[in-house]
Image: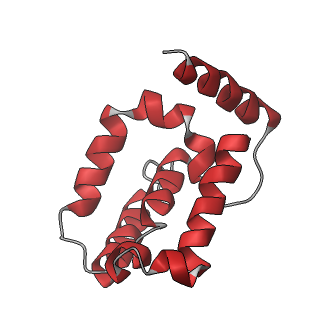
Amino acid sequence: MELRRAYKKTQQELLTNPELRRLFSRRFLDRLLDWDTVVDGYMRGKHLKPSGAAWKRQMRKMLDAKGYKKVTLDCYLEFIEKNWARLETYSHLYRTEDTVSQDDSCKTDELAVALAYS
């Protein structure tokens, strides 16, 4: 849970703190939450549902509107599929809603300890 709070707090500061924002390009800041949006949708299986094609079109449209290259979504999805085990461990970070189950917070705490001692 602490990792999620720190991640979301960092994003919030990057979005709202003028002093911090000056350190980053506008393009970076405009795209800050896009990865989370794609991973969250993937986690929820939106790419597999009957509406999967519509979800992919929606993601492509979002990325296109922000100036991403046409192949970006394909690259994101390929990366997600190849690295799913690690991303699943951190899935609570990318959720768009503010709730995280107790199970997820336990996984996070265990992972943080494991990473600290690896």
Is residue 105 visible in this depiction of the protein?
yes
Total numbered circles: 0
In the rendered view, tell whether residue 81 sits above or below residue 113: below
Q: Position of residue 24 (x, y in %)?
A: 38, 74
Question: Could you say which is closer to the camera, residue 13 or residue 82?
Answer: 13
For image coordinates 57% across by 41% down, the residue present is 91
Residue 13, located in which quarter of the rendered image? bottom right
In the rendered view, tell whether residue 87 sits above or below residue 6: above
For image coordinates 72% across by 42% down, the residue present is 2
Q: Position of residue 78 (x, y in %)?
A: 27, 44
Query: Which corner quadrant holds the N terminus?
Result: top right
Q: Position of residue 23 (x, y in %)?
A: 40, 74
Q: Position of residue 43 (x, y in %)?
A: 53, 45
For image coordinates 60% across by 80% down, the residue present is 16
For image coordinates 65% across by 42% down, the residue present is 3
Q: How is the image coloured?
A: secondary structure
In the rendered view, tell whether residue 50 sits above or below residue 87: below
Extreme residue in the front direction? 19
Is residue 51 visible in this depiction of the protein?
no
Question: Could you say which is closer to the camera, residue 111 or residue 80?
Answer: 111
